[in-house]
Amino acid sequence: MKESDFRKNLSIEVTLLESWVAHGWLVPATTAEGADFTAADVARGRLILDLSRDMGVNEAGVDVAIRLIDQMHGLRQTLHGLLGALDRHDRSLRQRLIAEIVDLE
Amino acid sequence: MAKDPYTLLGVAKTASQKEIQSAYRKLAKTLHPDLNPGDRTAEEKFKAVSAAYAILGDEDKRKRFDAGEIDAEGVEQPKRDFYRDYAHAGADQGRYTYSGGFSDFGDAEDLLSGIFGRRGGGGRANAAFRGQDRHYALPVDFLDAVNGGSVTVNLPEGGALDIRIPAGTRDGQTLRLKGKGEPGFNGGPPGDALIDITVKPHPFFVRDEDDIRLDLPVTLKEAVLGGKIRVPAPSGPLSVTLPAHSSSGKMLRLKGKGVKRGTKAGDLYITIRIVLPEKPDAALEAFLKDWAGGTEDPRRTMGV
């Protein structure tokens, strides 16, 4: 969607959106007609608003949270991929590995 | 019947607005679905707490609720998506996510970052994966960043990339070119090209957000008598009337002649700098020797 639709959707000012982009919290796609926002960008914008308005997290706090959230999703994907690969290899392997991890503890 | 909002937030009926806010914030930080991506129940709990806060957090609505004019179901939260539903799915798979590296995993580093790094978690071995993003650093000329322009970049891996620089691009900004990254796997979409922009400095323009600052040399004659002078501006030279009796350090503001971005434009700030003729001028010296004026001491406030 266009930048104006994105801002209308979240009811935010141009300057706020610009500061999000400048912080790297949002990286919209660049097209010949200007920036292009997706539904994921909207959900991400709503998360930034939740943090900064409702939860009272300051700018530095949002910066840290966003980075950690992005990293967490990356790690979850890696884990997801790894478990998927294990399952394809041997269905029972996951169970045995989990048992082993529990034993170690 | 929805649960009592006071019970949901865990506050007394007599709690102050401040106490209600802080109770909500504490709960939201624990329950927000995007802070609990693996917890399917987080969304329901968060929605219930948000709905309770929508009533109690608003003094007017709270009064009406206390008076029985609205009930707890009266303020349903609009349906919304959470970011976690996009972070690992569909076309946006892996757009913002990164795994943070595995260098502390020893030999597994290459394996884990290489195979799973930015690809997202698919299910089957032949699942379609989105290609990885490619990162580039691009130094851009000052005026291209201010006025916008396009640059063709030859890529190290062969081929070229046409990059449109939007007017008003800032130093440190990242441009995203959809589909210009690594090709996808098994029919998945290609990744994006992420271009980190560095704006090169200009010999006389200095950028300050959307304003531009410029030190402008003027002759002694122009400074004393004033008149029309030519001034460089990012969009092309301008004719500006210099007021008579302009001291060094005087600032002129040309509204809207700074960086244009969308419908807004910054200003151009010009600081006057008086420059004497390159070589000593006998006539000027003779005139100043005989000149009776100009005796007021500009350093009188400096205690010398």
Image (cartoon, rainbow, N blue to C red):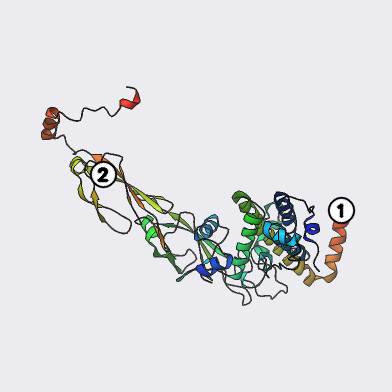
Disc 2 with disc 1 on a shared chain: no
Q: Closest to the observer: B109 or A64? A: A64
Q: In which quarter of the image is the N terminus of chain B?
A: bottom right
Q: Where is residue B135 in the image (x, y as percent from the top left)?
A: 53, 61
User: Residue visible at 64% across and 51% down?
Assistant: A57
- Horizontal side of A18 relative to B260 (left or right) equals right
The answer to which image quadrant residue A33 occupies is bottom left
User: Residue visible at 42% across and 59% down?
Assistant: B168
Q: How crowded is mark 1: few (under 14 residues within 10 Å), some or many (20 or more)?
A: few
Q: Mark 1 lies on which chain?
A: A
Q: Closest to the observer: B191 or B171? A: B171
Q: Which chain carries label 2?
A: B
User: Residue visible at 17% across and 30% down?
Assistant: B293
The relative height of residue B29 versus residue B187 in the rendered view (above or below) is: above
Say which element carries label 1.
Answer: helix
**Which mark is in front, 2 or 1?**
2
Q: In which quarter of the image is the C terminus of chain B?
A: top left
The answer to which image quadrant residue B169 occupies is bottom left
Find disc 1 in the rendering and name its residue.
A104
Q: How many numbered marks, from 0 up?
A: 2
- Can you tell which mark lies on residue B217? 2
Task: Looking at this view, name the residue that lies furthest to the top.
Answer: B304
* Amino acid type for the residue under numbered disc 2: Pro
Q: Where is residue B191 in the image (x, y as percent from the top left)?
A: 57, 69
- Can you tell which mark lies on residue A73? none
Q: Closest to the observer: B171 or B116? A: B171
Say which element carries label 2.
Answer: strand
Q: Residues within 10 Å of mark 2 (few under 14, many from 20)?
A: some
* Amino acid type for the residue under numbered disc 1: Leu
Q: Closest to the observer: B139 or B64? A: B64
